[in-house]
Image: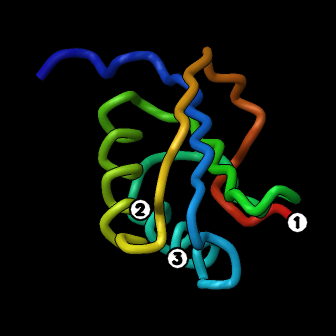
Amino acid sequence: MGEPLPAIRRTVLYSGTVQGVGFRYTTERVAARFSVSGWVRNLPDGRVELVVEGEPGELDRLVAAVDRAMYGYIRGREVREAPATGECAGFGIRH
């Protein structure tokens, strides 16, 4: 195995029926299984924002797991990547 890739920050904006269905709590539980840090929160426009930092492959697996867990509620997602900031310790829900 090679060296782990540098951490990145991924912001995922989910749209669909993603508020009022346990999306944030499900995402928090799913994220606990991965080596990531960040947060999830509802946005005023009805979307859910997931901001997560970690190794790219770990982020891929987390997003895929969230997609599976919330299948049927997600209608779209917008993804942006940036360098990791290291500002988060752990993963939680922001209000």
- In the picture of the structure, the residue carrying the numbered disc 1 is 95
Which mark is first along the chain, 3 or 2?
Answer: 3
Tell me the CA gap for discs 1 and 2: 19 Å
- Mark nearer the N terminus (1 vs 2): 2
Evaluate if marks 2 and 3 touch, with contact meaning CB atoms under 8 Å apart. yes
Q: Tell me, what colour scheme is on the image?
A: rainbow
Residue 61 drawn at (x, y percent): 30, 47
Q: Which residue is mark 2?
A: 66
Residue type for callout 2:
Val
Question: Tag 1 or tag 3, which sits nearer the N-term?
Answer: 3
Q: CA distance from mark 2 to mark 3?
A: 8 Å
Q: Amino acid at mark 3?
A: Thr
Q: Residue at x 61, y 15 (%)?
A: 83
Residue situated furthest bottom in the rendering: 21
Task: Give the structural element (helix, strand or loop) at label 1.
Answer: loop
Considering only vertical position in the picture, is 4 above or below 34? above
- In the image, residue 40 lies at what x, y percent? 68, 58
- Mark 3 neighbour density, 10 Å: few (under 14) some (14–19) many (20 or more): few
Using residue 43 as the reference point, say whether residue 25 is left or right of it: left
Residue at 41%, 62% (x, y): give it.
66
Compared to residue 39, the image places residue 16 above or below, namely: below
From the image, tell me which residue sits under label 3: 26
Task: Left or right? Give the position of 34 relative to 39.
Answer: left
Q: Which image quadrant: the N terminus?
A: top left
